[in-house]
Image (tube, rainbow, N blue to C red):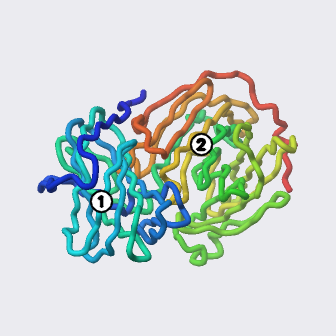
Amino acid sequence: MMKKTLGLAVLVLLTGCQAGNISPTPEAMKIDVVGNTYVTDGHKSAKVSPQGIQEWSGSEAVLSTWFKLSHTGELRLFMELPEDVTPATLQVRLFDKVFTLKVENGESPVLPIGTVEVNEPGYLRVDMQGIRKEGEQYPFVKALLIDGPAAAEPLHFVRDFEPYWGLRGPSVHMGYALPEADVEYFYNEVYVPEGEDKIGSYFMTNGFGEGYCGIQVNRETERRVLFSVWSPFETDNPQDIPEEQRIKLLAKGEGVHIGEFGNEGSGGQSYLIYPWKAGVHYPVITRVRPDGKGNTEYYAWFYAAEESRWRLIAGFSRPQTNTWYKRAHSFLENFLPQQGYLGRKVFFNNQWVRTAKGDWVELIEGRFTNDATARAGVRMDFAGGVEGDAFFLRNGGFFNEYTELGTLFSRTAKGKRPEVDIDALPLQ
């Protein structure tokens, strides 16, 4: 079910100031800072974006670059700098070993860092930190170069791929096998372990063919329950949608914000600012039902465990649509590029559907899939499966285990339908 690579062990052979007169061969692989590097400490004195290093003014900042090796043996490392640089002293760390690089004017733009012996394949983290500088900024490093037997293909890092998506990291999904009957309601429970609720996380619990519902960490002081339905008119600009193809609001819950969204298709969006907590189980119910007039109605409810009540998020009508519930699924994503180096994990448990005839059916089969970032092989830190009696999804953090695309999983059936009165769910 799982394909696993061992943890990375490194033995540093050359330490001290710089690594002598070693030079990269024509086979050396260039790992651009763009798309592969994050500020992992001292965030106030450095900024890295999908365009590369934007600011690096303080010595407390740590800039970390990751890449994944498939081979063992000697690995030679180099640093590529802009041609015009201000003199500075940098330190490069590989785990507990430190190399010191003195950057001078007029030097070759490629400087040797050192040589390491790789004993196990896997992800390697290289940290850069400024020690001294003559100008206001440390050099805006362009790339690392790796060479030697350990640098042979296949290698995994962001290349020939949009840096924005590479920095965000892979998104992972679990699709649930539905019965053949017309499905109206989907019940799911989301559980985020303590410490896994990183800012920028979207734990999407109840997806359907035309939208999704789940919980987000938007900032340290704000968390949301989000429910969105896409318009049948395909555009990233909500203003382009003709009136007859716009999502119509049917109902909104107490304290819920209603708006539009774009950039990934457009449609109706609703969200409730709610202080959900890691370590707590939250049930979610979504409903999809055709109205018999050529439209389909979508509703979402969130069980506020701290309040011991179901809360309506919203109800929407999607025009030119005639469907019951399709493509029940969950997913996990990070929506902030600067947070893509952090790991996340979520559990989804006790999936049930209720058919249009009122029958409850337990869902126990799931299929793992992932997004273009994972399929391109630029990031390999993605996984999903079953732990205990729950499905799980995991991404980010540059771990070495990964799950093959399309792997099927089955959880243990509980046989106990949700304790919820569907007909008593609030409609306003």
Q: Position of residue 291 (x, y in %)?
A: 72, 55
Q: List the residue tagged with mark 2.
A: 328
Q: List the residue tagged with mark 1.
A: 101
Q: SS at mark 2?
A: loop
Identify whether 138 is placed above or below 152.
Answer: below
The structure residue drawn at horizontal position 23% and vertical position 46%, both measured from the top left corner, is 115
The structure residue drawn at horizontal position 59% and vertical position 28%, both measured from the top left corner, is 364
The one of 234 and 62 positioned closer to us in this rendering: 62
- Direction from residue 242 to residue 343 in the image, left or right: left
**Residue 101 visible in image:** yes
Quarter where residue 193 is shown: top right
Q: Earlier in the sequence, mark 2 or mark 1?
A: 1
- Direction from residue 94 to residue 219 in the image, left or right: right
The one of 315 and 40 positioned closer to us in this rendering: 40
The answer to whether the residues at label 2 and label 1 have Cβ atoms under 8 Å apart is no
Q: For marks 2 and 1, give the one nearer the viewer.
A: 1
Q: Position of residue 104 (x, y in %)?
A: 26, 70
Q: Residues within 10 Å of mark 1 (few under 14, many from 20)?
A: many
Type of the residue with mark 2: Ala
The structure residue drawn at horizontal position 45% and vertical position 66%, both measured from the top left corner, is 49
